[in-house]
Amino acid sequence: MKIGVLIIGSLYWDDSPPRTAWRSERLNCVRQHQVRVPIRYGRRSRSRGYSYTMVFSPDLCEDQFGTAVAIPFKSENMLEEEAKHLWSAEDSGGTGPKGGVLAGWGCVALLENPQAPLSRTIRDRWTARIERERRHLKLDHTHYEAAAVDESGFLIIQWPKAKNGSPLEMDALLATATRPTRNAGDYPLPCKIAEAWDIPDGRKKTEYFWCNRAHGITTFQDAEIEDQLRKRGLAPGGSGQQEFN
């Protein structure tokens, strides 16, 4: 079984030691692909000054899909082991159970290639793994949109398409799905997303948006968010903002 990871945010570019080591040791980055997926800014993150980070948004129309990165793991047939390593790189604060794959704010989810369905044994083992940690998982969502992850720990989006048109030759993808922050039951508008960066704590964390852009991780909201940030003097190199690579 060929498995990979679907990355939609800072896990791709963050240079902290745990994430740098995880990418170097676990991923075959030479074979990475940019892919189209339903993502948007939708979760207020305490570790990022309560500014917004990305979430999967399964009800987005295909013309609103953003760009993420799919990278195969160096290993094959090690689904649960790679899930633990992924969560360790993602949850550096250790808020989830030791050796686990989920916490109250998010979880590792599994997406299978419909052209190469997983075996019943693999599906059952994954579901059993999620069941053991169920008490830590909160499958929240907006009023009009279903949760991105189902009760069995599967990511409910279509199989990604590569931007260059080439087939994504993997049997399954692991991804970190985070719980959206509900704003009166809905997602925030771009002006509200930018506003969350225009507070003392948030101003220090705008690199999340600019680094995503610099590394090709984008959403349909980006142009409006960027316009709002520039108006607020929050562009790289402006009003005390640092340059980002």
Image (cartoon, rainbow, N blue to C red):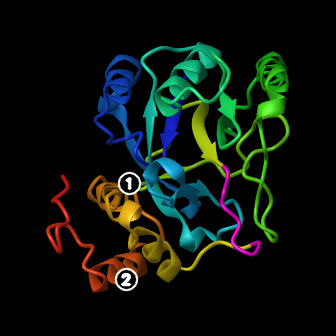
What residue is drawn where x is 49% and y is 73%? 193
Residue range of the region highlighted in magenta in the rendering: 179-185
At x 62%, y 19%, the residue is 79
Q: Is residue 191 left or right of residue 206?
A: right
Judge by depth and name the residue closer to the eye, 205 or 174.
Answer: 205
Task: Return the mark for residue 112.
Answer: none
In the displayed structure image, the side of residue 26 where residue 90 appears, left or right: right
**Whether residue 109 is situated above or below residue 208 in the rendered picture:** above
Q: Residue at x 68, y 31 (%)?
A: 102
Is 225 placed above or below 164 here? below
Secondary structure of the magenta portion, mostly?
A: loop
N-terminal label among 2 and 1:
1
Q: What residue would you read off at disc 1?
A: 164
2 vs 1, front mark? 2
Amino acid at the residue labelled 2: Gln
Total count of labels = 2
